[in-house]
């Protein structure tokens, strides 16, 4: 039921007046700022506060402006209401849905494909990390440290199971450091192969 004073009554008889601005045509809006999917509520991005809101009787549902509240880059979604703030000027903005769902879907798909076209298709491969040497290839200088580490890991340390054991981390760093030093020295003996010697 339309009224002469620019408002509309819903099925319960409540009056909802528009904000007095001219209606925005859905065909003139960016397709990514609309959601016209079948079976879902119609949503639109408010032109004033850039947040998603439901369309009720072709008007943006009344909501509060978040400019008084500290803004973050995270987008607000339905159901979230700020604890303070004034009524947003975009509340009750009329939106005329003058395009079909199919037209909107095609426009949205066109926007998404052009965005995908701007992305690079070239894949950048990361270099593979160098594999750790086998124990027989490690210098004999690290044998005692490796045995201490193996003994500690087999002791059932709860911090090792959680991956936060400072002792195990320190032993690994000492093994790595000792192996790097031994690699620089040309005459350092390697761990002998089992059964050899």
Image: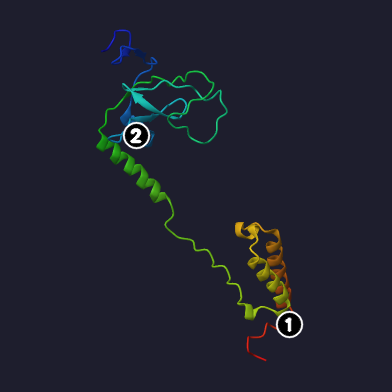
Q: Is residue 122 above or below residue 23?
A: below
Q: Residue at x 60, y 77 (%)?
A: 134
In terms of sequence position, does the residue under pointer 1 or pointer 2 come before the other? 2
Q: Quadrant of residue 131?
A: bottom right
- Within 10 Å of the Cα at label 2, are there few (<14), some (14-19), or many (20+) other Cα atoms? many
Q: Which residue is mark 1?
A: 188
**Residue that appears at 57% across and 28% down:** 70
Q: Left of 152 or right of it: where is 131?
A: left
Figure coloring: rainbow
Secondary structure category for the residue under label 2: strand
Q: CA distance from mark 1 to mark 2?
A: 70 Å
Tell me residue 81's x, y (percent).
Answer: 48, 25
Left or right position of 124 against 56: right
Residue bearing mark 2: 35
**Residue 32 visible in the shown view:** yes
Quadrant for the N terminus, please: top left
Tell whether 161 sits left or right of 40: right
* Image coordinates for residue 91, horizontal then vertical, percent: 42, 20
Q: Residue furthest bottom?
A: 197
């Amino acid at each position: 039921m339309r009224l002469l004073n620019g408002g509309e009554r819903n099925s319960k008889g409540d009056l909802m007046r528009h904000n007095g601005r001219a209606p925005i045509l859905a065909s003139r809006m960016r397709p990514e700022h609309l959601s016209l999917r079948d079976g879902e509520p119609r949503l639109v991005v408010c032109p004033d506060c850039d947040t998603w809101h439901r369309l009720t009787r072709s008007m943006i549902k009344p909501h509060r402006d978040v400019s008084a509240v500290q803004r973050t880059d995270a987008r607000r979604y339905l159901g979230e209401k700020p604890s303070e703030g004034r009524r947003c000027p975009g509340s009750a903005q009329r939106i005329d849905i003058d395009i079909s769902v199919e037209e909107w879907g095609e426009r949205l798909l066109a926007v998404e494909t052009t965005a995908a076209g701007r992305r690079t298709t070239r894949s950048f491969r990361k270099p593979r990390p160098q594999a750790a040497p086998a124990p027989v290839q490690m210098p004999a200088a690290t044998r005692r440290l490796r045995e201490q580490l193996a003994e500690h890991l087999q002791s059932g340390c709860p911090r090792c199971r959680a991956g936060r054991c400072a002792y195990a981390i320190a032993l690994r760093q000492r093994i790595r450091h000792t192996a790097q030093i031994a690699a620089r020295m040309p005459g350092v003996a390697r761990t002998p192969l089992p059964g050899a010697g």
